[in-house]
């Protein structure tokens, strides 16, 4: 694939790309690989290949002839399917806002794991600031070494440490001398303050050295502190590298870290953020993450919404796998699609006004793109459109589809704590505490006694101090998030 890429792969285009998209992709590649601006080895060849691909695809007749050489299955089968389920098929005219929930359930046909498994290009970015001294640093060292021992001979690992400056501990390397890597990690010393951009930018630079379609590229950031003044730079870097196919996951250790920032950082690349309160949490996450990356079939699923839709996308959440909030501005990074599994996301659209004279309203439309590196045309996309018929109020069926009901019930617990957060920000401690008490009742009904007790304890803390505790805030947020499963997977995942 690396040596004999199709013209579509060279310009990272789907088969149905428009002429405007072809021109845009070429200009992007030209800026990236032009020898005058990119002195790296191989940039001249990449620039030449992009020029050749553009010459063919920008000519309707040459493109038509070239398309005849493409495998028919690449054209007829996009490699993945999307089941679109909406909460309402019919709505009534109204001046008041109305909500329409949309569930996107993506999957692929069962395939051989051996046929699609690719080696990993994995980067660990480890916080070694003063606050990491002691048990936290030992926990990180132990689990980083354990992860390296799990990797295969074709996998590539790089390790970066940071405090107020960053250092490359292990440059991108295949797993040939585990003892050497173990000794390097075991000698990490703590000291200094926390500047995440220093570590993140160094980690990205190491990962990009080996970033290519034949590898699955991911970066894991571990920190126990807050960074000040460089959050915007971190988020911009995450969005930029997501376009190159690099996913980022963030792990917060202890209680004194910025969960909103790490959530947004992970969402910018389709990754996940997790709360690590004990050594066992870190071990479980790294083992689960390794299994998840091993099973990836398609990378960087992206939801692109058109401006034609009347609904405002005001909330999004990935329910499975790796539950996490999504950004609302388009393009929206959804995450990866696994082999023999599903990618399930929920979006909430708000219609401000529905005209009584119209017969139908377009709530949302757009497409989902996915990168499937094993295909001749890796970039594929599937369009969708969400429409509602406008009818008298008495003609509306109030029953929602079962998958929507299930997804909303899963989200309800998480959104209760979100609502308590917002009410507390507005200074209403009574409502915030009441919502936590409701949440505890629901958790008890599900048998989640430990989490329910933590929620009740936090409700009492709010009444006394008018704020969340650092520990309670994160425990409730990530605890309710971890309870989510997609429709039909309860028995399989329990």
Image: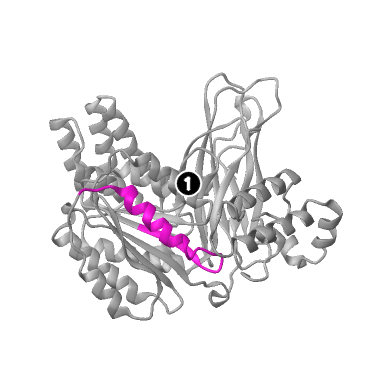
Span colored in magenta: 193-220
Residue farthest along the front direction in this orientation = 36
Residue beneath the point at 33% across and 76% down: 149
Tell me if mark 1 has few (under 14), some (14-19) or many (20+) residues whose alpha carbon lies within 10 angstroms of its own.
many
Q: Position of residue 62 (x, y in %)?
A: 84, 57
290 horizontally vs 246: left or right: left
Q: Nearer the viewer, residue 170 or 90?
A: 170
Residue 328 visible to the viewer: yes
Give the vertical position of 432 relative to 261 (above or below).
above
Secondary structure beneath label 1 = helix
163 horizontally vs 218: left or right: left
Residue named by callout 1: 239
Give the vertical position of 458 relative to 395 (above or below).
below
18 horizontally vs 109: left or right: right
**Magenta residue check for 103:** no
Residue farthest along the right direction in this orientation = 61
User: Where does the C terminus fall, quadrant-wise?
Assistant: bottom left
Residue beneath the point at 49% across and 48% down: 240
């Amino acid at each position: 694939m690396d040596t004999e890429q199709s013209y579509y792969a060279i310009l990272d285009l789907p088969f149905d790309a428009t002429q405007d998209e072809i021109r845009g992709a070429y200009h992007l590649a030209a800026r990236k690989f032009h020898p005058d601006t990119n002195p790296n080895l191989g940039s001249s060849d990449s620039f030449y290949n992009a020029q050749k691909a553009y010459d063919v695809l920008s000519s309707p007749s040459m493109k038509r002839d070239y398309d005849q050489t493409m495998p028919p299955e690449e054209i007829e089968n996009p490699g993945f399917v999307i089941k679109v389920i909406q909460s309402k098929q019919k709505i009534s005219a109204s001046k008041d806002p109305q909500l329409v929930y949309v569930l996107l359930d993506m999957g692929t046909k069962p395939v051989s794991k051996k046929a699609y498994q690719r080696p990993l290009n994995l980067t660990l970015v480890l916080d070694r600031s003063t606050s990491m001294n002691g048990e936290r640093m030992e926990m990180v060292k132990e689990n980083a070494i354990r992860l390296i021992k799990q990797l295969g001979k074709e996998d590539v690992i790089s390790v970066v440490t940071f405090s107020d400056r960053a250092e490359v501990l292990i440059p991108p390397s295949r797993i040939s001398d585990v003892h050497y890597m173990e000794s390097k990690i075991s000698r990490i010393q703590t000291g200094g303050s926390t500047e995440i951009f220093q570590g993140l930018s160094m980690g990205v630079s190491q990962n990009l050295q080996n970033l290519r379609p034949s590898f699955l590229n991911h970066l894991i950031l571990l920190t126990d502190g807050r960074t000040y003044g460089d959050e915007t730079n971190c988020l911009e870097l995450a969005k930029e590298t997501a376009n190159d196919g690099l996913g980022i996951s963030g792990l917060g250790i202890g209680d004194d870290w910025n969960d909103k920032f790490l959530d947004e950082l992970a969402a910018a690349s389709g990754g996940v953020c997790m709360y690590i309160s004990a050594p066992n949490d870190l071990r479980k996450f790294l083992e689960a993450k390794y299994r998840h990356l091993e099973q990836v079939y398609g990378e960087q699923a992206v939801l692109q919404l058109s401006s034609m839709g009347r609904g405002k996308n005001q909330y999004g959440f990935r329910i499975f796998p790796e539950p996490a909030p999504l950004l609302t501005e388009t393009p929206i990074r959804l995450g990866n699609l696994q082999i023999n599994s599903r990618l399930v996301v929920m979006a909430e659209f708000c219609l401000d006004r529905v005209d009584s004279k119209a017969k139908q309203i377009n709530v949302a439309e757009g497409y989902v793109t996915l990168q499937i590196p094993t295909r001749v045309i890796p970039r594929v996309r599937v369009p969708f459109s969400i429409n509602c018929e406008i009818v008298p109020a008495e003609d509306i069926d109030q029953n929602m589809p079962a998958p929507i009901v299930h997804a909303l019930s899963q989200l309800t617990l998480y959104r209760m704590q979100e609502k308590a957060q917002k009410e507390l920000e507005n200074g209403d401690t009574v409502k915030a505490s009441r919502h936590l008490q409701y949440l505890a009742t629901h958790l008890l009904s599900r048998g989640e006694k430990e989490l329910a007790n933590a929620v009740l304890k936090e409700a009492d803390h709010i009444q006394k101090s008018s704020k969340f505790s650092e520990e309670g805030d994160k425990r409730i947020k990530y605890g309710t998030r971890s309870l989510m499963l997609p429709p039909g997977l309860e028995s399989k995942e329990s």
